[in-house]
Structure formats: structure tokens, C-alpha cells
Image (cartoon, rainbow, N blue to C red):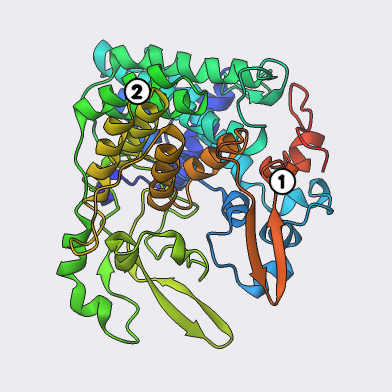
Amino acid sequence: MKKILSNTLKISALILLVSFSSCKKFLEIVPKGQKTPTTLADYEALIRDEYGNQRMTITQAILLMNDKFETTANLNYYPLYSVNYFWNENTDRIPISGSDEGPYYSPYTGISTSNLLIEHVPAATEGSDADKAQLIAQAKVLRAVNYYLLVNYYADPYEAANAAAKLSVPLIQSADINAPHTQVSIKDLYAFMLKDIDEAIPNLRATSATPLHPNLGAAHALKARILLTMGQYEEALSAANEALKYNDKLFDWPQFYATYKTQIEEPDKYTNAPSPMGFDFVENYYFRHGASNSSGRESALRTDRAPKFETGDARFASRWKLRTVAADTYYTSITIGFYNYGGLTTTEVYLIKAECQARLNDVPGAMNTLNAVRIKRIFAQNYVPLSASGTVEAVKLIQRTKANELINSITTFADRRRLNKDPNYATTLTKTENGQNYTLSPTSHLWTMPIPLGAIKNPGNGTITQNVNK
């Protein structure tokens, strides 16, 4: 998988040079030791920039969900961390938003790369028309991935009744320096994402060069995710079924646990197995890192998060283990490697399909789809097929599994936001910390993150309106 990697500095230089090229003749001035992209292979290499284009940074959303254990040092040092972790609705987050701007600027870095490819690949040399069309299509899928993250972080949840009246984030369609942009409505941005995907699909293939390059399965999976977020269940179900035609494999977590059982169960041992969720994960449609693109451990979990997993969940047992260090007790990560936090997997698509089936009143079908995932997660001695009496119960069971399967991803955050708009599923989060009780209402303004103050003050060639009051 190391072959995916290119020299990040060189790739960044390529992006900068080409970004300038449309407004000035900087393509004629090449730094020593660098080159400007001319061939299709040069442009294709930009997608492989894992730090610049293939990361998902959503720290504040993860803190707000209260799945992640956070250190006292970070909570004391970063006021924004503390506000979201302790659900402090009284503090104005806007003045302190500059302490975590990554979720804003990182996706826009990827969007700039996508725009660059869409604009310049048609003129690339040494590539067939079909290969050029495929690379442009992959760039459009990646652009939609990044806009989905932005709109579900910095704008209110999608609601058909008011999506046209509420603002989302700046829509930028050019890599040119000082390109104009418009902060479009939530409705318009969702329409743009779907348009990108629909335009991409005819030019994608069933397989791609690496897991970082979206293929047909990835495009249909992303379309299913977006349509589910919009509440368009029939269309989302159709897209999910299309994705599963290209990959329907599920990883066997009980078997993984059995393979590493001795190490996992050994007392005081906290490095037990390599992560199976990396570049070659059998469930991958498209791989994308979380906040870090380096090999390492997952985030530790709060102790009150563990009971939300099903009894006998081999996936949980294989990945986290209770540990006490000084005054802190938490579930520490026990695998090392890479994790597909920001990409698209078959598990997500199965669970999108299950929810759509339930919403369309096929509750038995929904439970069959859910159980197809669960049987690959729950130890045999604990596994019992689930059934539901109706749509509401079915969706709640599906969401329980989905929240655990996709923990610490933008998907679980987006799901919680949209479900909070429905009285059948709205949930008040609660916790006790140092003897004090805390709650987070489903209607809290904290569910929408403030656009960083730096972006508001320096909006480039356009204007940006803040989407929250504080």
C-alpha cells in the first residue's frame, strides 16, 4: 500500500502551481527539483496525497457525541473542546472557533484538488479519453464526499421544508486563486452533490487503481448516504442495492477475535492485533483516513460508551479493552494500523438499505438485512436474530448497530442530527462527570458547528454568513 503514497511536498507544490496557472503564467516558473503536471499520471498522483486529500477531521463532532474519551489536559487547554464535551450551551463558540479549523479547511483542500483535476485533466497528455474521463469522475465523487462533510458539520440538518431557505457553506467550483464563490442554500448544495455523482457514474469502473480512487461501488454508496440524509428512501434503497452489486462482503469479526483471542484476553496487554480496517479491508468501496493519515491506534472510548454495544459484540471486544492509568479509566484501543473512518464500506450500505426497507414498511426485510450484518459481529453464543414490531422499533435497532459500526465518523453525527428532527427518534444525551449531571437536547444549537471566525473575516472572493448564533 506504500505505493499509493507520493511525496506530499511535491504534490502540494503541483497543486499550488496549477492553481496559479489560470490567472498568471506561473506554469512557466518551476521551482528547482519540482515539475508541473502535464501527463495524466501527474494529475492522477494528486489523489494519492493522503494528508491533503484523504483525511476526515471532525474532532468537535466526536466530542459532542461523547463517544471518545478526552484527556483532562486537552479539555483544560482547548476551550472549544470543553464546550462541546460538556455540552455548555451558554458559551459563545464563535470567538474560540479558531482553535479547531481543520474540519473546514481540510475538506476545502480536497475540493480544490478536485476542481483542479476537473479543470485541467482534459488537456493532460499520455492518457486515453476514457482514462481522463474516469479521473474527472473520481474527482467529482471526492468533491461530493468533502461537501457532505462540510454541510453536515457547519450547516443545519437537511429538512425538505426549509432546505431552500437555510444557508450551507461556500460552493467553490474552481481551483483558481481568488475564484468567486457563493454560500448556497442547503437544498442547492445537496443537489450539487447528487449532480456530481450522477455525472461521474457513467465514467467510473467497477475497480480502480487504489482504494483512494472511488469506483462505481463508492459512487452508488455515497449517493445512498446522501439520499438517506435527505429522507428520500426509495431512491436511497435503489442506490444501496446498486452499490452492493459491486461489493457485498462483510468482515467476520468473531473469526478475527478467535485468531487473536490469546493476546486479547491476556491481562495487562494492550497491543493485540493489526487493524483489519485499513487499505485492503474487505468491506471497502473507498478508503479515507480519520484525522491522521499515519499508522496508529483508534481513539479511546468513555466507559459509559461500552454498554451501548450489544452483548457479545466481537467487533468491540477486538478493538477496545478496559484500562486504568492513574486517575483515568477508559477503553483503550488494542489494534494498530489504519482505519477507514472517512470512506465508504459495505456495512454502511447494508444499514442504509435496512433503514430504507423499514421506512418503506418492509420491516421483515429490514431485519433480515440488519441480521446479515449482526451475524458477522456477534459471538455465536450471544447471537439471536432480531425482529421488530414496526418501523420505529426497526429503525432504532438499525441505528443502534450503525452507531457502533461507524463510531467516530461523520455518518453517525449526520444520522443523529437528522433523527433528532423526528419525535420518534429524537434523543437527549446524558452523562455524569465528576459527580455532575449533563444533558444535551436534540434541539440544541450545539449540533451545528460554527464556521471558523477566520473564514468569516477572510472569505476570499465572496461573502460568508455564520450559520449559528453562538
Residue 428 visible in the current orientation: yes
**Circle 2 is placed at which residue position?**
237
Residue 44 in the image: x percent, y percent?
A: 34, 30
Residue 391 in the image: x percent, y percent?
A: 42, 32
Q: Give yes or no for contact between labels 1 and 2 (Cβ–Cβ under 8 Å).
A: no
Amino acid, disc 1: Leu
* Label number found at residue 138: none
Q: Is residue 218 above or below residue 276?
A: above
Residue 34 visible in the current orientation: no
Query: How busy is the neighbourhood of tag 2: few (under 14 within 10 Å), some, or many (20 plus)?
Result: many
Residue 468 in the image: x percent, y percent?
A: 78, 37
Which residue lies at the image location 68% right of the left edge and 23% below the top edge?
Answer: 178
Residue 469, image quadrant:
top right
Instruction: List the single residue furthest toward the front.
Output: 389
Label 1, label 2: how far apart the Cα atoms are: 31 Å
Q: Secondary structure at mark 2?
A: helix
**Circle 1 is placed at which residue position?**
446
Q: Is residue 126 left or right of residue 401?
A: left
**Picture mark count:** 2
Q: Is residue 351 above or below residue 431?
A: above
Q: Which one is earlier in the sequence, the residue at label 1 or at label 2?
A: 2
Which residue lies at the image location 82% right of the left edge and 43% below the top edge?
Answer: 470
Amino acid, disc 2: Leu
Q: Is residue 163 above or below residue 293?
A: above
Q: Is residue 84 left or right of residue 308?
A: right
Q: Secondary structure at mark 1?
A: helix
Query: How busy is the neighbourhood of tag 1: few (under 14 within 10 Å), some, or many (20 plus)?
Result: many
Which residue lies at the image location 70% right of the left edge and 48% below the top edge?
Answer: 441
The one nearer the camera, 193 or 454, is 193
The one nearer the camera, 322 or 175, is 322
Q: Nearer the viewer, mark 1 or mark 2?
A: 2
Q: Is residue 224 above or below residue 337?
A: above
